[in-house]
Amino acid sequence: MAEANAYWFVAKTRHGAELGVRNQLSRLGVESFVPTRLRRATRGRGMVEEPLLTSFVFLRACKADALNLVHNYGVKASLVNDCATRQLMFVSDKCMEDFRRVLEASIEEGGLIDKPLAIGEKVRVIQGALKGVEGNVLELQGRIYVVVGLLNCLFARARVPRAWLERV
């Protein structure tokens, strides 16, 4: 990892603080992402934004800036280390873009998958809103999905017609 290049770093927050940390990063001018969904609030108070992944925020910065945010700017999060490499855990721009697009495309029929999947055929979407997204094909109850993973532990899926997929 080059020092000057920006990556998506994984930051851990305390439970329930995800949206606050995202807003704090936004005020500091740092691009961040928290997978969320809208749900109807209790007692008819409208819609509420709810994190799909508790205690985690993704932030895009170079390594020095990411460390500086946590240590000097009071961002209530800690950067996560990869246990295998003992380096800060990060995600490439392409992986994060694919993950976000798939998650936003079909939150009701798709959304986060909480367990790893058997390895399927590697595919690329060639039409529609997800054109260019690369992932694995999955068939559930006769429906075809493209599955995109982050860090081999977070997976998102979106329903895609079989004709829109090509082998990679």
Image (spheres, grey):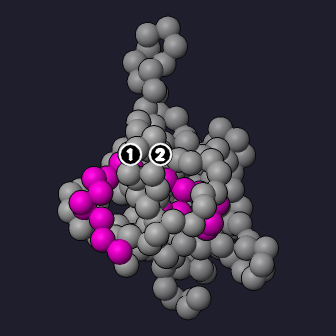
Farthest-out residue, bottom: 2
Looking at the rendering, the stretch of residues picked out in magenta corresponds to 148-167
The quadrant the C terminus occupies is bottom left
Look at the image and tell me whether residue 96 can be seen.
no
Q: Residue at x 59, y 88 (%)?
A: 1
Q: Is residue 158 magenta?
A: yes
Where does residue 53 sit, x and y in percent of width and height? 60, 46
* CA neighbours of label 2 inside 10 A, class few (<14), some (14 to 19), many (20+): few
Name the chief secondary structure element in magenta: strand
Q: Pinpoint residue 35: horizontal percent, then vertical percent.
A: 50, 48
Q: Nearer the viewer, residue 141 or 152?
A: 141
Query: x and y percent of residue 8 in the render?
Result: 52, 70
User: Three-letter amino acid code at disc 1?
Assistant: Arg
Label 1 sits on a secondary structure element that is strand
The residue wearing badge 1 is 143
Residue 3 in view of the camera: yes
Residue 27, horizontal then vertical, whole percent:
46, 54
Q: Give the vertical position of 59 relative to 46 (above or below).
A: below
Picture residue at 38% right of the left edge, 51% below the top: 144
The residue at which mark 2 appears reads as 140
The residue at the far front in this view is: 142
| Residue at image coords 69%, 66% | 79
Q: Nearer the viewer, residue 9 or 112?
A: 112
Q: Circle 2 sits in a helix, a strand or a loop, which is it?
A: strand
| 48 falls in the magenta region | no
Label 1 – label 2 distance at C-alpha: 5 Å
Instruction: Name the residue at 62% across, 47% down.
Output: 114
> Does residue 117 appear left or right of residue 162 in this picture?
right
Mark 1 and mark 2 residues within 8 Å of each other at the beta carbon:
yes
Closer to us: 118 or 142: 142
Label 1 crowd (10 A; few <14 / some 14-19 / many >=20): few
Corner quadrant of residue 26: bottom left
